[in-house]
Amino acid sequence: MIAAADALYLVLAIPFAAAGVLALLPGYRITARLNVVATAATFAMACILVVDRPPVGRFLFVDDFNVYLIVLNTFVGFTTSVFSASYIGHELETGRLTPAYLRFYHAMYQVLMFAMNLALLSDNIGLMWVAIELATLTTVLMVGIYRTHEAIEAAWKYFILGSVGIALALFGTILVYLAAQPVVGEGLDALSWTRLVESAARFNAPLLNIAFVFILLGYGTKVGLAPLHAWLPDAHAEGPTPISAVLSGLLLNVALYAVLRFKMILGANPEAIAPGPLMIVMGLTSLIFAAFMLYRRRDIKRMFAYSSIEHMGIITFAFGMGGALANFAGLLHMTMHSLTKSAIFFAVGHIAQVKGTQRIAEIRGLTETHPVLGWGLVVGVVAIAGLPPLGIFMSEFLVISSTFAREPLLAVPLVFGILVGVGALVLRLHGVAFGEPLGSTAPVRATHVPMLAHLAIVLVAGLWLPPPLVAWFQNVAELLR
Amino acid sequence: MGGLSFDIAHLLAGALVLVSFLLLYQSRISALISAFALHAFVLALAVAWQAAIQDAPHLFVTAAIAFLFKGLVIPIVLNRMVVRLRIHRAIETVGGIGPTMLVGMGLVALAISVMLPATDLADPLTQEDLAFALAVVLLGLLMMVTRRNAVSQVIGFMSLENGLILAATGAKGMPLVVEISVAFSILIAFIVVGIFLFRIRERFDTVDVQALDRFRGERR
């Protein structure tokens, strides 16, 4: 049995060491398998953290909130690496990636996992910033890995917008330090999140307010909130599909997690502005904007990227509303969206490979030619559209009903945005999944296990949530206030 | 003595804002790179002065990094790159110097009017440093928005990071972790940028150089 403190370090050390090894090892078969083994081991370590929790350390800590995201993060990282193994083999065959780039890809995948886990586990807001910057840089490199004109454009756009966002977040972090310094004292303590929340009530409120605006704009860029979302559709559409899955399913969550940590600091200070309204406005804007953008999309990956913006909008809105029920719904929605959206990208990745195109107009009748992929996509889209009985229906229902109970007027644009989004998704799904088959009908040589596993979890969660999980989500929702 | 050290810190931070304005209206790329070197040099002086008056020797490292890396190495590398890409004499349309400068002044006013009231409790030096730092950050953003060329966007971004370093050093006792990480991340950022500039060459080719080659009948 591994002690909790060791598990904590191993969650970080395994991906870090794997990155080094994968950078050196030649051969696609070994590296792809090793990638899967490393992510599986990281997931196992994360599960230990759930059962047994290490004490708060100098830089790292585990609490109810981040432990659930760590498990989600490592789980989706693991399933994506299984998907990536079959996806990347095809890319190698068709010559879109060279063996050298593949080595680089696997190493970067592990660095990304390391950076995201570090961001989630760090108690130090400076360290958290460094980790998110590292995650940004690795994804920039991966988005540009195909080296086509469009991929480079997408990566450049992501790099510029991402760096500006990350720079603003650093300015916000410095301001938080300045607000904390007279109370907590100089040095490392004034960056430690646990210390900051403890004594936040005595911080200089105006400074905290400005800091939060910078944090929200900075990390909000990474969450993909409108109007700072411009990088997101391009980065999703042009990079390798496993990266689209990880970006949508995990990195957006990690950035939102950072915002929420700062929201908790603000919440502990009675004189600071309420961060809720800011988040509600940004969330609603993203939701409605993305819902309308869904109609005009011609590229299938781009369409699901806009759907991610839409859902991050809903989640930000839910946390902006605050309160036990809305926070609960936000946490549930975060989980469900991660699982569903990555399952959709798993399906879309194989579909795009077999059809040789990402254009929606050129993909038709999937349920006839590729039943598993086609129906998998149907279930995934039905789930992401928020139709019953799947998990997202439940979380969206909770968001809407809690909004109706407290601010009925706000529920109107919320429901409107969600319905507009549903319309677009159903419209597009109909053409892609049904009708006369178009394009290649060659069978897919790939494992569908990751996609089916995610969809199964989403289905089960829609029907029945285990009571301990509910109790735990409620606990975290209380923590978030 | 307190008065003098305050004045010098004030002067250096103010100079950084001034050089940011200088960056805004440089239309030729090689001139822009030189102006950026000056920007990094002023930053190094400001950080070194902070190190001296705060009695924080580790800040000298930050100052040295700013001077050597951003003031010397990056401008030299960028200059070479620009020559190799054959865009060193290229003149970029900045989109009207007058309006850009006016917007820039507005941003500085905004930075000061936002930061000064908020940091009432902090000591005046931190307060003004922070206001200037925010001004530099906003001017860097403005530059990134008004430029189309990849090299000038990167320079805009680096001037923005300079503003962040000014803010971080102005915050008394900010732990070393952050400074090193800032410097380190800039390093990584620059590697990324280097790779990008190599790949982005394609883009420049189609914009001007290839057209020129075709015109001369020496298509590669």
Image: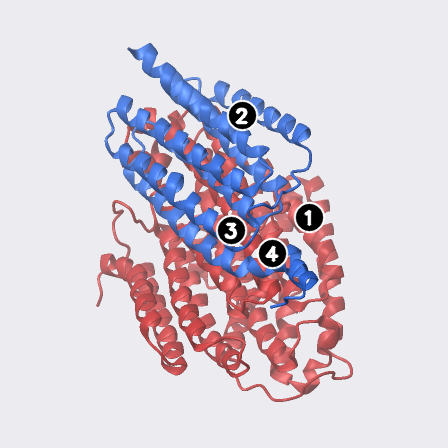
Chain colours: A red, B blue
Tell whether label 4 touches label 3 (CB within 8 Å).
Answer: no
Q: Nearer the viewer, mark 1 or mark 2?
A: 2
- Does residue A419 appear in this view? no
Whichever of labels 2 and 3 marks the residue nearer the N terminus, that label is 3
State the residue position of label 4: B204
Label 3 vs 4, first from the N-terminus: 3
Name the residue carrying label 2: B111
Specify whether disc 3 shares its chain with disc 1: no
Considering the numbered disc 4 on the image, is that residue within a helix, a strand or a loop? helix
Label 1 – label 2 distance at C-alpha: 34 Å
Q: Residue at x 69, y 45 (%)?
A: A411
Q: Position of residue A43 (x, y in %)?
A: 36, 67
Which residue is found at the position 78% from the left and 83% from the top? A436
Q: Marks 3 and 4: which is nearer the front?
A: 3
Q: Secondary structure beneath disc 3?
A: helix
Residue A144: x and y, percent? 53, 63
Residue A414: which disc?
1
Disc on the earlier residue, 4 or 2: 2
Q: CA distance from mark 3 to mark 1?
A: 53 Å
Check contact, mark 1 vs mark 2: CB within 8 A.
no
Q: Based on the displayed image, in which of its 4 quarters is residue A432 positioned?
A: bottom right
The mark tally for this picture is 4
Query: In this picture, is A50 found above or below A94?
Result: above
Tell me the residue that label 3 is attached to: B83
Q: Output the chain of dot 4.
A: B
Q: Please tell me whether mark 4 or mark 2 is closer to you in this view.
A: 4
Relative to A174, residue A142 above or below: below
1 or 4: mark nearer the eye: 4
Q: Quarter of the image for the C terminus of chain B: give it.
A: bottom right
- The numbered mark at residue A319 is none
